[in-house]
Image: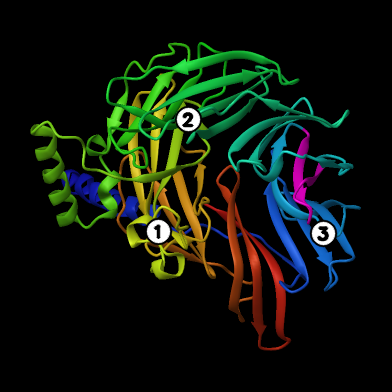
């Protein structure tokens, strides 16, 4: 009897664990705001103190008048404070950066040289804003702030190449910083390391045939502190990298590499910055346990066999992946590097209209959209040793611009969640190290009341928030049997 009792207990635990693992995320709180897509532009930003900042702009039809609102909500989605900023009516939100007690928001105007920066104090809601005319720029891709000084990556108005600028908001002085050199060089990462009081810019230098990395470090005033050229192994090109925080002896570069065509990656690598030489830790796609799991099992097996034969005969890798890296996630034990595998989609070329052959026309075509095959996450320790990898198939996920389509969050229990919005659903994948789950998991967003129905969802989004919680948001049309239809901007707290 005792043996049977132990056996039943073991069987019950084996059944119980998968059931618990399949329990859907909770939706404990929902906030609805009376916004419509016709009248309001809105963004949701997670703050370091477990609160949310909601920005929204209201304007008239001709955009000759506009009001810019900023409201903070606590973790229970209760309003903490609200304020407005008197910006030019043609100002359009671009992006934000958060550090310490402030969030910095950037707005562009109809004149592509004019940019307005807003600084918000998280605790008081006090705002500061100022418009700057930045002559060299016609677009801003990224910016970071160190000691209230701005480091901006943008597109050069003259040659349309990327450039790095330093902006002193007190004096309004804009200074170009030494950065990109090669014809096809670009920026891979920009990190404001506040503990070290420096900004690190990771630059991919390329002449179209070979590429290498260099890292330039600046102080808050834009003074160059150090320049690191990362030497690499023969026949290996370092495509891009994310840099870790810490002092020079601790900093790591984690990124992708290529063995031939610079457009495609064949694997990942990790290397210490201080060595100035890529010493080891290269991981080809073939070495990763789950990178190819987005394929059906038979196709994955055939692909692996074909690749192994190529390598045995001394040929270069046949894997060709375009990978869009996410910002590095720092964990208590190391780092998580996430990336999305994508490929551009083109419409049929009309060479006769331009007098070009179809082959020549491909050099001038722009992608209509970017389709995703899957996303991956790789866990590294502090020394850059790969601990695990996992994958998230992204069937039917596309974007009109090359931007991130999934959100990635490291949970308190060590798991990683990847998620993206799909109409009124959240599609997600919970990753427990390298244990791959091939089941598609979806969460239907809940309205306020059980008798209500979500009729439509527009501009859905999801961001990581705090702890095990994410925030899903967007515009919805809700049908209530008693009170009729309403249009709202919603925020649903989702807790894994």
* Alpha-carbon span between mark 2 and mark 1: 27 Å
Which disc is residue 90 wearing? 3
Q: Residues within 10 Å of mark 2 (few under 14, many from 20)?
A: many
Can you identify the residue that label 2 sits on?
204
- Magenta range: 101-119
Can you identify the residue that label 1 sits on?
361
Residue occupying the point 73% across, 86% down: 483
The verdict on residue 66 being magenta is no
Q: Can you say whether 483 is above or below 60 in the image?
A: below
> Of callouts 3 and 1, which one flags the residue occurring earlier in the amino acid sequence?
3
Disc 2 vs disc 1: which is toward the camera?
1
Locate residue 184, reporting x and y percent: 47, 36
> Of callouts 3 and 2, which one flags the residue occurring earlier in the amino acid sequence?
3
Could you say which quadrant of the image residue 92 lies in?
A: bottom right
Locate residue 120, reporting x and y percent: 82, 42
Residue occupying the point 58% across, 69% down: 446
Q: Could you say whether the residue bearing mark 2 is in a helix, strand or loop?
A: strand
């Amino acid at each position: 009897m005792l043996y049977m009792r132990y056996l039943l207990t073991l069987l019950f635990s084996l059944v119980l664990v998968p059931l618990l693992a399949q329990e859907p995320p909770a939706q404990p709180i929902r906030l609805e705001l009376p916004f419509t897509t016709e009248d309001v532009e809105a963004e949701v930003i997670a703050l370091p103190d477990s609160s949310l900042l909601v920005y929204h702009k209201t304007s008239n039809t001709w955009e000759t008048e506009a009001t810019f609102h900023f409201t903070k909500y606590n973790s229970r989605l209760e309003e903490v404070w609200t304020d407005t900023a008197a910006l030019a009516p043609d100002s359009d939100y671009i992006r934000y950066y958060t550090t310490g007690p402030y969030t910095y928001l950037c707005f562009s105007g109809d004149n592509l040289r004019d940019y307005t920066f807003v600084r918000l104090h998280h605790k008081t809601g006090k705002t500061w804003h100022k418009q700057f005319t930045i002559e060299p720029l016609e677009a801003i891709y990224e910016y970071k702030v160190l000691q209230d000084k701005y480091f901006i990556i943008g597109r050069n108005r003259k040659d349309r190449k990327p450039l790095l600028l330093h902006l002193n908001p007190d004096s309004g002085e804009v200074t170009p910083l030494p950065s990109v050199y090669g014809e096809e060089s670009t920026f891979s990462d920009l990190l404001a390391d506040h503990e070290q009081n420096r900004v690190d810019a990771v630059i991919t230098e390329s002449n179209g045939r070979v590429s290498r990395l260099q890292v330039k470090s600046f102080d808050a005033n834009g003074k160059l502190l150090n320049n690191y050229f990362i030497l690499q192994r023969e026949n290996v090109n370092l495509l891009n990298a994310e840099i870790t925080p810490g002092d020079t002896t601790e900093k790591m570069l984690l990124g992708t590499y290529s063995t031939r065509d610079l457009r495609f990656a064949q694997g990942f690598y990790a290397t210490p910055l201080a060595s100035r030489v890529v010493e080891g830790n290269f991981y080809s796609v073939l070495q990763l346990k789950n990178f190819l799991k987005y394929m059906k099992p038979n196709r994955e097996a055939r692909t692996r066999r074909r690749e192994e034969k190529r390598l045995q005969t001394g040929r270069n890798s046949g894997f060709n992946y375009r990978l869009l890296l996410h910002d590095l996630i720092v964990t208590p034990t190391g780092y998580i590097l996430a990336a999305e595998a994508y490929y551009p989609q083109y419409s049929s070329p009309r060479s006769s209209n331009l007098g070009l052959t179809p082959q020549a026309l491909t050099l001038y075509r722009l992608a209509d959209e970017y389709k995703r095959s899957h996303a991956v996450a790789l866990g590294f320790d502090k020394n850059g040793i790969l601990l695990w990898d996992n994958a998230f198939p992204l069937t039917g996920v596309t974007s009109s611009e090359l931007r991130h389509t999934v959100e990635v969050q490291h949970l308190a229990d060590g798991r990683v969640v990847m998620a993206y919005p799909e109409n009124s659903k959240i599609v997600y994948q919970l990753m427990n190290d390298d244990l791959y789950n091939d089941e598609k998991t979806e969460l239907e967003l809940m309205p306020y009341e059980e008798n209500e129905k979500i009729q439509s969802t527009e501009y859905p989004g999801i961001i990581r928030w705090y702890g095990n919680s994410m925030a899903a948001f967007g515009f919805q049309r809700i049908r209530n049997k008693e009170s009729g239809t309403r249009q709202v901007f919603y925020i649903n707290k989702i807790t894994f």
